[in-house]
Amino acid sequence: MFSRRAILSTLAGALTAPAQRAPQRPNLILINIDDMGYADIEPYRSEINYTPNLARMAKEGLRFTSWYAAPVCSPSRSALMTGCYPKRVGLSFGSWHAVLMPGDWHGLNPKEITVARLLKQGGYSTGCIGKWHLGDQPEFLPTRHGFDYYYGIPYSNDMRPAPKPNAIQEYPHPPLPLLRNDKLLQEVTDQDFLTEAYTKEAIQFIEKNQTKPFFLYLPHSMVHAPLAAGKAWRGKSGKSLYEDSVAEIDWSVGEILSTLHRLKLANNTLVIFLSDNGGTPRAVNTPLRGNKGSTWEGGIRVPAIAWWPNKIPKARVSDEIVSNMDVLPTFAKLAGLNPPPDRVIDGQDLTPLLFNQPAAKSAYKQFYYYHANQLRGVRQGDWKLHITGELYNLKDDISESKDVAAANPQIVTKLKGLLQEARADLGDGTHDGPRVRPYGKAQGPLRFWIPRHPDSGFPPQAPVKKIPGAPY
Ligand SMILES: [Ca+2]
């Protein structure tokens, strides 16, 4: 038999040992830019934008050249938060538009376990600062999805509860709700202060939580139209407001990184920078084909840089297939937590690639391209098959300029088989696969953060923009 003293001492040892042994868990920062093109920044050989901080970040870290997001905002963000294909979590589109709209009755299901909820349950402080876009009804807001703190605009900066329908000329900058946690802080019409305000809020969050592990999600409203830039940045590029706006984003990233250095947190913080979808025609998507909203590479492949001094080897480039879905598994791994075991998680743990472990490869057997709820293609290795039957070798032809299907019938057959696997698992069009989970439905009555004009026609009685295959 153990003596009472021995038991007590063992218990004391058990209680204190983990704290002594456990390495300090890293802080995790995810910076997400709205609509930034693949080559809008210097590390991706942009010739026009002035982005010295991102250039430095890439020199000190790892640049991904095959990071896949989604063609548009809400689906992209659902993948980031859940580690799943947007179709898996019912958010491949909104209730009547390609993305969630103000007063939408759809949103990220409160039953989903977001990366924020997982980290919060694991003892992290969690903050979301910026554009949410996973539902603006109370049950869908960041504070209901695992974030301790929220400051930002819950949807896109061009969305109007419409003083009048289609009044873009009359209201180029619609009134937007700026929230703190789940309360309206102010209505915003002039967006010039937004990037700076988000940056200051982010720095305050880091300062406040510097002694404990934290997760900061910083999804900027820029560089989505209508464009804006702070006074110090307007005209700075000498070119266009778009480039001024990109330059201010670069400044913001520099501020975040220098805050980490100032607080001596840099060696214990992973920062990932990316864009939520491909660039619009005003962006630089070179050498990719297509733009935001498409499943050409230019619609879905985004710039992505990972930075963690003395942990991620410097100045590396990885062309492995990675995606938004990898954030949850990767952050869980770094925090010593397990992804939710009771559901499918599509993403992979990126740590072997981040830390350049020998022979580290993408864990994706294949990657599927969806546009809204429709399957549009599949990539396996260097090969990409579009649903149209076009085949491209992305290694030889990143611009998808030469259809080589006729010369490679066996590869086409193999990839068609993978498309069938996607249909059986995730589904296609109105058909949802067996392991697709439901989107969140607002319990209502619907809340509009900005009052609607009675004649605004918003939300519409009939779909304004019908998405092919959408279940209206
Ligand atoms: Ca976007």
Image: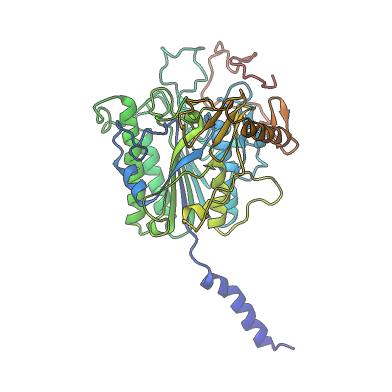
Residue 355 location, x and y as percent? 47, 56
Left or right of 354 on screen, residue 17: right
Please give the count of numbered marks on the rendered protein.
0
Q: Is residue 247 above or below residue 455?
A: below
Image quadrant where one finds the N terminus: bottom right
**Above or below, comparing residue 16 to residue 41 in the picture:** below
Task: In this rendered view, identify the residue nearer to me: 216 or 253.
Answer: 253
State the image coordinates of residue 95 (x, y, percent, origin top left): 64, 24
Residue found at the far top of this picture: 455
Q: Residue 173's spot in the image, x, y percent?
A: 41, 21
Quarter of image, res 312: bottom left
User: Which residue is located at x 58 percent, y 50 percent?
Assistant: 329
Q: Is residue 344 above or below residue 188?
A: below
Q: Quadrant of the C terminus?
A: top right
Residue 236 in picture, x, y percent from top left: 24, 31
- Horizontal side of 269 relative to 99 (left or right) equals left
In the image shown, does 383 or 124 lie closer to the viewer? 383
- Residue at 58%, 24% in the rendered image: 98
Can the viewer see residue 289 in this picture? yes
- The residue lying furthest to the front in this view is 407
Q: Is residue 365 left or right of residue 50?
A: right
